[in-house]
Image: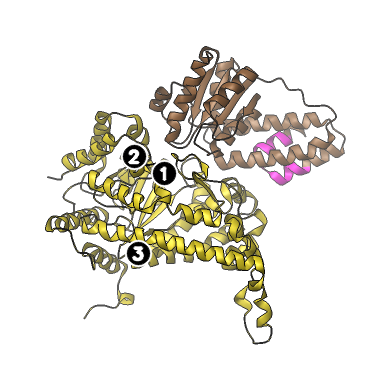
Amino acid sequence: MEKKWEDMSPDEKQEARFQKWLSPEGVKFASPEAEKLYKERATRIKDAIQMKKRPDRVPVLLIPSFFPAFYSGLTPRDVMYDYEKANNAWKKFYIDFQPDAHFGCVAPGPGRFFDILDYKLYKWPGHGVHDDTTYQCNEGEYMKADEYDAFLQDPTHFFNTTILPRIFGALEPFKQLPNVTTVNEMYGTGIIFFPYGLPDVQAAFKTLLEAGSEATKWLQYFMAFEKEMPALGFPSGQAGYTKAPYDILGDTLRGTRGIMTDMYRQPEKLIEAMDKMTPFWIQKGIIESNMNSNPLIFLPLHKGADGFMSDEQYKKFYWPYLKNILLGLIDDGVVPFLWAEGGSNSRLEVIQDLPKGKTVWLFDTVDMIKAKEILGDVACIAGNMPMDLLTIGTTQQVKDYAKKLIHNCGKGGGYIMANCAFFDDVKPENVRTMVEFTKEYGVYK
Amino acid sequence: MAKDLVNLLADLKEQEVIKIVQDRLNAKEDPLKILEDARKAMEIVGNRFAGGEYFIPDLVYSGEILKSVTELVKPKLTKAAESKKLGKIVFGTVAGDIHDIGKNIAVFMLDVNGFEIHDLGVDVSAQKFVDKMKETGAPIIGLSGFLTLAFDSMKETVEAIEDAGLRDKVKIMIGGGQITEDVRKYTGADAYGKDAMAGVALAKKWVGAK
């Protein structure tokens, strides 16, 4: 009899999640060749991550930003507003370059959805930045320095009535929504609900319904893509994403300047808020892993990079709370796929405090020899193909760098070739070289 | 007492700093002296950052404390502070890019180190840089950018400066997350700084300051 999920060890859960991913339910492979490719690729990535067995070769992943749009002669605006064009461009990208996994076509997001809600948190092509540029965040204190208590008391109500009205212009009337946690006796209940009758609140809900329809429309294209890519031989490289608590608070709530000053002015509140967020974001990772039958959950790391805080601050504010998220995921068999943006040299010793074969660390800029030395026994490392090389380098430079990476990090497995950061308008021949060279030179003999 | 303020601000002791500033203002001390102490403290902060002892949050926080100090001192100022400036710098994030955290830190450190900064903000076109250069006669230009798309905007800005016949009149520095020596060459800039204090060192070198 099959073991019940709650009786399984984290190891067994991870293996079970990988097995589901290796034999995807309901996927009708386009050809026997596609099925063979799928299994080989998924096994290769699994072996590199688990570090129990050396893979047949160094896996190679491409995680693009708007590159597929540029490659198809489209602008970022085109693919944010025309979901079919986005689908086709991303499909063409994966088919032409043949990396070992696909990362969905989620990146652009539904342009019209953001239009409808008057999204304030970002500028995007055609909406604050040029059609041919990528979306960019409007830094700000969307949660004010004196709002920690309100957030801590009831994060959901705080999001509904404070954050949503600030980041979506169309939802400003939500400021008036009641806290339904006090719905109790018949007596008084009618009064609680009167804000839903206010004309501006009702109008905001109508707009929200319209936005929901748009998101659903976009999601259909997205889900079709998620179904089609495995059938063509590409396992999915991410089931969803979660984040480090410090980044959750710092990126889009307190802002960079806000959270940096909080470390000095109100460190206890900041820590309490990170603790409060943690279960929500562990749960998010687990749910998305379950939903997509894929163990890999992506974690883009931002504000813990070299220079962005001292070692002491990293050990106090960043790592312990990130580690809680990682252990929460690992405990349920989910595999955190971390992408450490910026420099990581000063963090390597700290982050090695993890169970073996349970995480992937994709590095932007780091001394990869040191990274292999320090993390090599604990985790699969990945990435580091420099952005300046892909953008303005020659194919020979890319080849030389890839060779160095495979030589320094590939030994015995535990390395995945990948770009160091999401890429936009880079040279296609450089991307192609990175993939093809890895497939040739990265074979373990 | 003067030394106390310098050290306390350099050590980022916000509450003590505020108290000392208030005490000194109550004692009718010349507010310009207080600002001079604050400037000295910021020099120490900059040096600690360059030396690897301080990190970005320390710079940001020192800026926040300095803001509070300036707010306290300002109403008491009878004449404008007359500090000799080391030189003018036109600064901005290049076209297509709206990232400004790095730029703001660089501008802040250049400012407290005695430069007169003309900050053009973000998504600045090549033409705007050229216009501002002509208007101010600034001998130094700082181009900031985080996206790889900024490489081309930087290159175009350098070319526009060249087309305007001004290339030999200015030194151009670039900076940002993905900037390397290869990118510097690609854009045609004179130098790149890996962080704000590297930018200060470049600017000082270019104007012949110590």
Name the magenta segment's main secondary structure: helix
| Label 2 element class | loop
Q: Chain of mark 3?
A: A
- In the rendered structure, does residue B15 fall within the stretch colored magenta? yes
Residue tagged 2? A73
Q: Residues within 10 Å of mark 1 (few under 14, many from 20)?
A: many
- Which labelled disc corresponds to residue A76? 1
User: Foreground: A21 or A79?
Assistant: A79
Q: Colour of chain A?
A: yellow
Q: CA distance from mark 2 to mark 3?
A: 33 Å
Left or right, residue A422 beside residue B11: left
| Label 1 element class | helix
Residue located farthest toward the bottom when viewing the structure as drawn? A186
Chain ID for brown: B
Q: Chain of mark 2?
A: A
**Residue A134: image x %, image y %?**
45, 42
Q: Quadrant of the C terminus of chain A?
A: top left
Residue tagged 3? A289
Q: CA distance from mark 2 to mark 1?
A: 10 Å
Q: Residues within 10 Å of mark 3 (few under 14, many from 20)?
A: many
**Residue B134: image x %, image y %?**
61, 18
> Is the residue A46 above or below the residue A188 in the image?
above
> Is the residue A409 above or below the residue A53 in the image?
above
* Residue A276 shows up from this direction: no
Q: Chain of mark 1?
A: A
Magenta segment: B4-19
Q: Earlier in the sequence, mark 1 or mark 3?
A: 1
| Label 3 element class | helix
**Residue A438: image x %, image y %?**
21, 41
* Residue B99 shows up from this direction: yes
Q: Amino acid at mark 2?
A: Gly
